[in-house]
Image (spheres, rainbow, N blue to C red):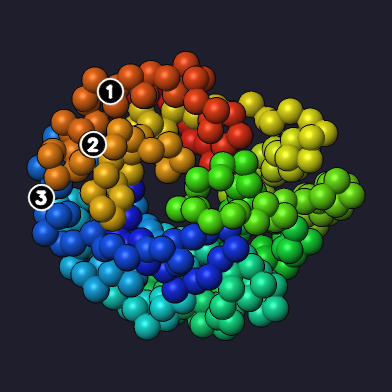
């Protein structure tokens, strides 16, 4: 289960509009009301996301409540205020994932819109020093793809357990709460595709141990899917086939309480967690939506950058 603790954000990313429009937070009382449904659904892990979840004044109480119910808790954060909360977060979350999209202050500021490279690195190191499993997530785009090796080295230097790479989503105009004119010139241009291929080859050749140990979460083959994605954005290839059954084992609850089958596809407008999360997920229209996703009937799935697959037990 993914819970958006806040629609607000203290980053100013070019890829996202949460920071422009976000106002609402998910309350401790609302999360408390979700607990019976979470147990009935057999929930194992709760990811606290947003917006920026650490802007919610009740984030620690919410995490403590969930952990006290035997649920694994996982924090996804921009990391701007992580250093301040590192000790507490390290004790509450099984895993902490920090978005770090640049290997130097200039690149970070150009992508994230704030001059916070130093504080974010400090937060990663402070959280790692608590013994928490801290991982780094990089969204690859024109401004940073040449820094892949440097980002791997930086993540290791900061004490992270793993670094993962994801292509910037330019195919779904409604992701990340986008409302305004979306600046799509974040993807690689045709003349840069060969450069990305060379970067991946060099990474495979020079950082082989990082692949073998799992420090780089993706295999070289999966990184080449990112290359193929950008080729498709440029109109030079088909989008790589997507294998995903995430809506079969996970769901998203927004800060306003609306339930969706996944991050990229909105649920029915009147599907609210406050009416019973299990009831909302098992309504006929939500089941029909999952069936449509399963059958490949949603265009968002064909260009998804964040697919997940879990084998049935």
Vertical order, 262 against 71 (above or below): above
Label 3: few (<14), some (14–19) or many (≥20) C-alpha neighbours in 10 Å: some
Camera-side residue of 203 and 11: 11
For disc 1, the marked residue is 285
**What whole-number distance in Å separates the C-alpha atoms at marks 1 and 2?**
9 Å
Left/right placement of residue 2 relative to residue 230 reads left
Task: Using the rendered image of the protein, determine whether residue 154 is visible from the camera's viewpoint.
Answer: no
Q: Earlier in the sequence, mark 1 or mark 3?
A: 3
As helix, strand or loop, the secondary structure at mark 3 comes to helix
- Please tell me whether mark 1 or mark 3 is closer to you in this view: 1
* Numbered-mark total: 3
**What whole-number distance in Å separates the C-alpha atoms at marks 1 and 3?**
23 Å
Name the residue located 60 percent from the left edge and 47 percent from the top edge: 169
Task: Using the rendered image of the protein, determine whether residue 243 is visible from the camera's viewpoint.
Answer: yes
Image location of residue 97, percent across then percent down: 46, 61
Name the residue located 47 percent from the left edge and 16 percent from the top edge: 295
Image location of residue 230, percent across then percent down: 74, 43
Q: Mark 1 and 3 residues: CB-CB less than 8 Å, in contact? A: no
Query: Which quarter of the rendered picture does the N terminus lie within?
Result: top left
Q: Earlier in the sequence, mark 1 or mark 2?
A: 2
Name the residue located 49 percent from the left edge and 20 percent from the top edge: 297
- Please tell me whether mark 2 or mark 3 is closer to you in this view: 2
For disc 2, the marked residue is 271
Label 2: few (<14), some (14–19) or many (≥20) C-alpha neighbours in 10 Å: many
Left/right placement of residue 272 relative to residue 48 reads left
Image location of residue 212, percent across then percent down: 66, 48
As helix, strand or loop, the secondary structure at mark 1 comes to helix
Image location of residue 231, percent across then percent down: 78, 39
Left/right placement of residue 30 relative to residue 228 reads left
User: Residue 33 has which mark?
Assistant: 3
Q: Mark 1 and 2 residues: CB-CB less than 8 Å, in contact? A: yes
Name the residue located 24 percent from the left edge and 73 percent from the top edge: 57
């Amino acid at each position: 289960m993914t819970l958006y603790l806040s629609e607000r954000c203290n980053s100013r990313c070019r890829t996202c509009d949460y920071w422009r429009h976000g106002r609402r937070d998910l309350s401790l009382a609302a999360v408390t009301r979700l607990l019976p449904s979470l147990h009935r659904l057999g929930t194992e892990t709760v990811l606290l996301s947003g917006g920026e979840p650490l802007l919610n004044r009740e984030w620690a109480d919410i995490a403590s409540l969930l952990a006290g119910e035997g649920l694994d808790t996982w924090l996804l954060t921009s990391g701007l205020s992580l250093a301040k909360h590192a000790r507490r977060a390290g004790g509450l979350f099984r895993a902490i994932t920090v978005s770090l999209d640049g290997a130097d202050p200039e690149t970070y500021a150009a992508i994230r819109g704030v001059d916070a490279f130093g504080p974010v690195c400090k937060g990663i190191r402070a959280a790692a020093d608590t013994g928490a499993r801290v991982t780094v997530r990089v969204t690859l785009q024109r401004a940073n793809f040449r820094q892949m090796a440097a980002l791997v080295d930086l993540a290791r230097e900061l004490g992270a357990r793993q670094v993962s790479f994801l292509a910037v989503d330019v195919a779904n105009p409604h992701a990340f709460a986008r409302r305004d004119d979306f600046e799509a010139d974040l993807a690689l241009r045709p003349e840069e595709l060969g450069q990305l291929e060379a970067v991946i080859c060099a990474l495979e050749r020079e950082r082989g141990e990082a692949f073998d140990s799992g420090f780089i979460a993706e295999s070289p083959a999966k990184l080449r899917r990112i290359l193929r994605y950008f080729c498709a954005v440029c109109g030079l290839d088909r989008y790589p086939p997507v294998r995903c059954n995430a809506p079969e084992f996970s769901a998203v609850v927004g800060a306003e309480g609306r339930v969706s089958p996944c991050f990229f596809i909105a649920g029915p407008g009147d599907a609210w967690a406050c009416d019973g999360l299990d009831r909302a997920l098992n309504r006929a229209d939500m089941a029909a939506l999952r069936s449509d996703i399963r059958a490949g009937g949603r265009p968002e799935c064909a260009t998804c950058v964040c697919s997940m697959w879990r084998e049935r037990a």
